[in-house]
Image (tube, rainbow, N blue to C red):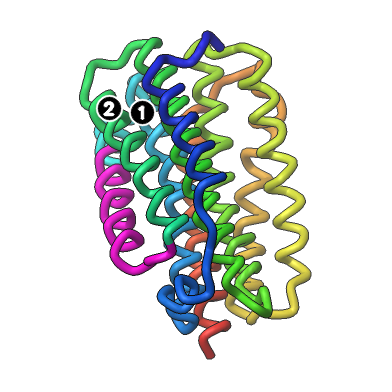
Amino acid sequence: MNTLPKTISTLLLAAVLLAFGSTVHAEEADAAGSNNLAQLIDIAGKQRMLSQKIAKAYFFYGQGIRPEKTRKQLFDSIKEFDANFDLLKKKVKIQGVQDMLVYIDMAKTELAQIARAPYSKENASLVMDYSEAMLEGSQDIVVRLEEISKHKKELIVDLSGRQRMLAQRIAKYYIAYQAGFRDHNTVEQLKTAVAEFEQAHATLRKAKRNTAQIKTELAKVEKLWNVVAKFYKDVERGGLPVIVLATTDNIMESMDRITHQYVAVLGS
């Protein structure tokens, strides 16, 4: 990939400064509210997924694949990301999180502007970069929220929620490859995401907190995964983008339900 544009370089520099300039204090941790911690991790985790879903929808729409559906998905996802952003900004008063939200705000604003412009490979490259910036920032918030937990019981919410993101990330890199981004990084990012998804799925299948409902949903995810995994692992062959789009979204929706069920289990 070419050198990052100046705006993205500025964002990355800001992230470095924020990472070294912010700490989590005990009184700030209390402000987050321990009773709602799992829910906040769920919301922050969903931001990771939306960062990838926005970019994925942009690529699918730009390639003219199910244009009405993917255009709606693009702008619905941007709207949902903004709503969750406002909620986190209001509910989480940890200084490090607030600082990171400033960084994410810059990235999401730039991405939303590009999403409204005509599709081009240059714009698609920018969308890819901004989606990565939003993902990294959202992951930082998840980590900061997890640090508040003394018992680390919320880690399963993070792991399950991350599967939502990986499903969309895989589809993003799959369609990016079909759209002409056939560099080594695209293929490696796709392979890495596929391996991480499969490893996490195996871990979740063995989780002690699994209810009968969670087990049923995980089995459904496995069946769906078996349908599309071969396409991801042989991305160079290409083809069948509509199947990839529909199946990946179904996997994401199942993982979203599973994550909410873990949140409910932790709250019971």
Residue drawn at 56 percent across, 45 percent down: 20
**Rendering coords of residue 225 (x, y %):** 64, 47
The residue that disc 1 covers is: 58
Q: In which quarter of the image is residue 87?
A: bottom left
Q: In which quarter of the image is residue 206?
A: bottom right
Q: Outermost residue, bottom direction?
A: 268
Q: Distance between the residues labelled 2 and 1?
A: 7 Å
Left or right relative to 1: residue 155? right
Q: Of the residues shown, which amino acid type is indicated by label 1?
A: Tyr
**Rendering coords of residue 204 (x, y %):** 71, 65
**Rendering coords of residue 222 (x, y %):** 67, 55
**Rendering coords of residue 246 (x, y %):** 46, 42
Q: Decide: is 204 above or below 98.
A: below
Residue drawn at 67 percent across, 74 percent down: 152
Left or right relative to 255: residue 75? left
Q: Is mark 1 on a helix, strand or loop?
A: helix
109 vs 53, nearest the viewer: 109
Q: Outermost residue, front direction?
A: 21
Does 107 lie within the magenta span? no
The residue that disc 2 covers is: 115
Characterize the local packing of mark 1: few (<14), some (14-19) or many (20 or more) Cα atoms within 10 angstroms. many
The residue segment tinted magenta is 74-94
Of badges 2 and 1, nearer the viewer stands 2
Q: Of the residues shown, which amino acid type is indicated by label 2?
A: Ala
